[in-house]
Each structure stands twice: as C-alpha cells, then as structure tokens.
Amino acid sequence: MNNKIDHNKIPELQHRNFRNDDFWTEIPAWANVTRGEFADHLWQQKNAIRKLEQVKKVLGERLKEEWYKDIEEALHKAPMNIRITPYIFSLMDWKDPYNCPLRMQFLPFASQFIEDHPCYMADSLGEDTDSPVPMLTHRYPDKALFLPTTICPVYCSYCTRSRIVGGSSESVEKETYGASQKKWDDVFEYLRNTPLVEDIVVSGGDAYMLTPAQIKYIGQNLLTIPHIRRIRIATKGIAVLPQKILTDDKWVGAVEEIHKLARSFGKQVVIHTHFSSPREITKWSQMAMDRLFNLGITVRNQAVLQEGVNNHIDEMVLLTRQLGYMNIQPYYVYLHDMVPGCEHLRTTLKEGVELEKAVRGTTAGFNTPTFVCDLPGGGGKRHVASYEYYDEENGISVWAAPTVKPGEHFVYCDPISKLSKEAQERWSDKETREKMIADAVKKAGY
Ligand SMILES: *Cc1c(COP(=O)(O)O)cnc(C)c1O
Ligand code: SF4
C-alpha cells in the first residue's frame, strides 16, 4: 500500500466528474437497451444476474472459459449467492475482471480465495447473542439494530450477515426470510418496553426490498414510540440500483412520508447507504442523490475497507470527496469483519490506521469518515487507533469496550496472508497461535 498522495494522479477536481455514458451498451446482451429502459428499476431487477448461466448469456463472446470455471468453482464454496443488477454488472471492468473492485465485491473467483482465518466466526459480531427478540440486536444502551428482512437487490460476497442473508448457498443453509410482518410486532413491543432506546437502525438485508406499505408500517410503529427519536434506514440501493430512487415513486414516496411524519414529531428519519469504491459512482448516483437531497433526506455512507477495492489512498480520498460532493456524508469505514469466505478481501488493522491518517485533512471534517473496527465477539464499533495492544508482527490486536462490555477484552486478527513468512508459520501451529494470542491479551493488561 502506498500512502503518499500524488496530486498529479488525483487531479483536485476529479471527484466532480460523474460518468454519464451509455456504459451498459458494451455488454453484448444490453447493446440495444435504451437509457429509458435502463432507468427502469423493474427492468434492472428483472434482469439481475442470479446464476452463472446468465453471466454467460449476457457476456456472450466476451466471457473467457477460464473466468467461467473460476466463478463456477467459487459458487460451490461461497457462503453468498450472487445477485447483481445490470447497472453494477456493466460497471465492472470486463477487460480486467481479476482486478476490478466491483467484480471482487459481487462475483467471486475461486482462484482468489484464501483459507478462512482460524479465528473467523459465522456470527463474528455476536449479533445473535445480543438479541432479546428475533430480528433485533440490542447491544448499546440507547440504540438497537432491527433486521426486518434478509434479502437485498445485490448480494455482496463479503456480507457480514452471510449466515442469514441471501438464501442458502451450496455451502451454507440459511433461514432467509423476505419480510415477515407478523414477527415485527414483537420487536415493536420490546422497544415500547425499553425506554432507554432512542435510535433504531432498520437494516437487513436491505430496506430497498421492503414494500412501500412495509416501510410505512415500520416507520409509523417506531415513530409513535415516544422515546424513539431517530431512525436510520439502511440500504445499499443508492449505490447498486440508483434507478429505484429515480423511477420507483411509491417507494420514495413511502420514505418521504415517514420522513415528514418524523419531522412533525421533531424526530429524524435518515438513510444510511454503502458505497465502497469510486467505480460504483456515476451520474445515476448523483441524480438519485439530487432527488433525495431535494426532499431534505439526509444520506450517510458506510464503506468496508477491502483489499484491492479501496485500500489505496487515492481511491479512498476520491471516494470520500465524491460522496461529499453529491451530498452523502461519509460516516464509517469498517475494517473487514472476520466472517467466512472473504479472507482475500480483508486488510490489516495497520492499513486502516494509515488510511485514516491520510484521509483526515483532505476535506471537511464532517465529511471525513471514522475508521472503525466492529469487534469480533460483540464489543461494538471502536476507532481503529484505539486498540489496547497491537502485535503488528503477528497481526493480533486486543481491544476493550468499556461501555458495551465492561471488563471484557476482544481480539481482532489481521489476515495471515499479509504477515511475514515467519509469522505465517507460527499461525499454522495451533499451540503456537494460541500462545501468541494469550501473550497479546496479557500485554494488553488482561
Ligand atoms: C452498528 C450498530 C448500531 C449503530 O451504531 P452507530 O455507531 O451509532 O452507527 C447499533 N446496534 C448495533 C448492534 C450495531 O451493530
Ligand atoms: S447489501 Fe448489506 S446485507 Fe445485503 S449482502 Fe450486501 S452487505 Fe449483506
């Protein structure tokens, strides 16, 4: 990773350029798709790529046999299914798919897989442990996470909730649910009886997949609980399917309605979205944002730090500036969770700390994301530089979470593939690695 800002390479105004060509016409199957058709969110959803055969069908001659085999093998092992909107699929670099930050996020190649870290966990963040009622995680005193659905318009290969999101894959059985309204009432009941909670994240899955009626139902139920002051609706949609904001008036109307209702109560409804690299930002994103901005709806961004996607200073600065430019507030950049099937996408903690240093100061402070590690085992989100102890050589960091789990300690591990040969060898021996972790924990004062 090279952290020097090269001002010649990032012309200061590059972030104001939003791609606006008919890029999808480069994909053989969509060569004749008009701008009007492409703008239709229903067309996007109907033509989403969900099977390997469809990759072949749309790419035709452009698909190389080796890619096909690589994807096929990946899908046998991957915890996530694929689902890719034509918008995202056609923004992928089909001249060099191996290095394309979009392909890496949504279409796995087996040749890039690395063995899972010995300390990974399917529920790395302990969301099921801190769950007082199904579909709700209540870890922090005044905020809670509500997961009303487990489906999304696009599936990320690295989903932190791959244990439940996106339907069973060949390697993981899941009880994926669309939206099951009946069970939500138990969540509302719990929240009504828990007066400390002021803040609800409505996530999933993806709120894009909720119907307008469901958005209103959730909004009205939550907003009429007197102590609930703030709701965030989490959707990656603005990044992967901006066409819905432009052409699904009923969905936007539902969000607008609960946003207005909230304001009439002196409360907040905002959207949290998920852009990870500048490659997924186009004029379509800006147009979608213009509409939401016009409605007065605040949008913030949460990105995941990933190898080859955004762990380079130029990419991260451009992403940050471009988000700010289209009125999205960069909120968090997460260190990658230690979940299965995506070891190749993780970075070290050190990279996170270095990037945070480099990004801070490049734009307005309120448009500068906080780099956080969401602690394995449910310690919650912590600033990347706030570890108690970090053994860089062996890639082991030890953390405290004084508010969330006082007295407990948490361990995050860097990907072994990024450590020295000697350290890699130490990790390969069970006894040695257990001792290394125990040593680090002791050095942290536990
Ligand atoms: C991330 C998260 C929240 C929200 O945390 P913020 O730091 O306010 O964004 C709430 N509950 C859970 C369980 C979370 O993981
Ligand atoms: S949009 Fe979010 S919930 Fe859906 S697959 Fe991606 S990371 Fe997982």
Image (tube, rainbow, N blue to C red):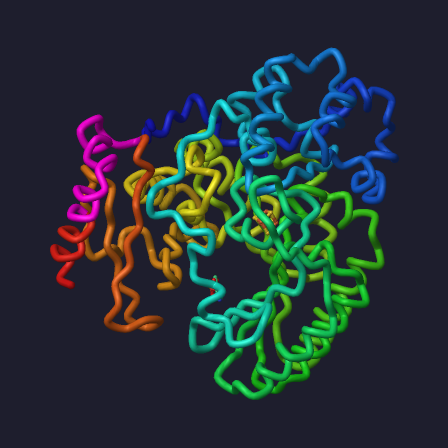
Quadrant of the drawing holding the C terminus? bottom left
Horizontal relation, residue 278 to residue 25: left or right: left
Q: Main secondary structure of the magenta part?
A: helix
Residue 383 occupies quadrant: bottom left
Q: Position of residue 306 (x, y in %)?
A: 44, 37
Q: Position of residue 431 (x, y in %)?
A: 18, 44
Is 32 located above or below residue 428 in the figure? above
**Residue shown at 72% from the left, 32% from the top:** 51
Front residue of 166 and 37 = 166
Horizontal relation, residue 351 to residue 151: left or right: left
Front residue of 166 and 218 = 166
Q: Is residue 290 magenta?
A: no
**Residue shown at 37% from the left, 60% from the top:** 377
Residue 190 occupies quadrant: bottom right
Horizontal relation, residue 151 to residue 192: left or right: right
Q: Which residues are magenta?
A: 418-436
Q: Is residue 433 magenta?
A: yes
**Residue shown at 35% from the left, 71% from the top:** 404
Q: Position of residue 214 (x, y in %)?
A: 77, 67
**Residue shown at 66% from the left, 65% from the top:** 148
Q: How many marks?
A: 0
Q: Position of residue 28 (x, y in %)?
A: 79, 18
Horizontal relation, residue 172 to residue 404: left or right: right
Is 35 located above or below residue 80 in the figure? above
Front residue of 134 and 206 = 134
